[in-house]
Image: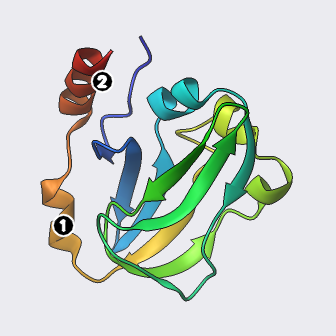
Amino acid sequence: MSSYPEKFVYTKEHEWVNAQDGIATVGITDHAQHELGDIVYVDLPKVGSRVEQGKTFGSVESVKAVSDIYAPVSGEVAEVNDSLTTTPEKLNEDPHGAAWLIKVRMSAPDEIKKLLSAADYQSYVGAES
């Protein structure tokens, strides 16, 4: 079983958030990349676009399927991990590190409180499998 960073919070749709100083770094979890298999393409929003908690903001395509990515928090996209456009396989290699997807300037930081702790997420994916 993989470990999930304690300082992150998680969604039931398998995204993680690391929030610091009003900026939320967002990625997909190790569980998500494992379920997807080899990732071949990532579709991300443009800097300056708005994302809304619970709504899709992009997708990840693997050899198995295309999966939507859901915004864990609302706000404006402040940065996009452009390296994933040329090396999407980084999501398989380092989903909780170098392969973050977007950074969001949060418009409602309290939304973080609705997300799962690392222990709760681990229990959730454990129950799911």
Seen from the viewer's position, the closer of residues 102 and 33 is 33
Asked whether, in this view, residue 39 is left or right of residue 95, the answer is right
The image position of residue 86, as x and y in percent, is 86, 54
Quadrant in the picture for the C terminus = top left
Q: Please, which residue is most extreme toward the bottom here?
A: 48
Q: In this view, does 60 lie above or below 35?
A: below
Q: In this view, does 62 lie above or below 100?
A: above
Residue type of the residue flagged with mark 1: Glu
The image quadrant of residue 92 is top right
Classify mark 1: residues with Cα within 10 Å, few (<14), some (14-19) or many (20+).
Answer: few
Q: Please, which residue is most extreme toward the right here?
A: 86
The image position of residue 52, as x and y in percent, is 33, 75
Element type where label 1 sits in the image: helix
Seen from the viewer's position, the closer of residues 81 and 88 is 88
Q: Residue at (46%, 37%) from the top-left corner?
A: 29
Asked whether, in this view, residue 123 is left or right of residue 23, the answer is left
Classify mark 2: residues with Cα within 10 Å, few (<14), some (14-19) or many (20+).
Answer: few
Q: Residue at (82%, 47%) from the top-left corner?
A: 87
The image position of residue 43, as x and y in percent, is 67, 62
Q: Which of marks 1 and 2 is in front?
A: 2
Of the numbered discs in the image, which one, if any, rests on residue 17?
A: none
Q: Please, which residue is most extreme toward the front here?
A: 65
Q: Is residue 32 above or below residue 56?
A: above
Of callouts 1 and 2, which one flags the residue occurring earlier in the amino acid sequence? Answer: 1
- The residue that label 1 is drawn on is 111
Residue type of the residue flagged with mark 2: Val
Q: Is residue 92 above or below residue 17?
A: above
The image position of residue 89, as x and y in percent, is 76, 38
Of the numbered discs in the image, which one, if any, rests on residue 125?
A: 2
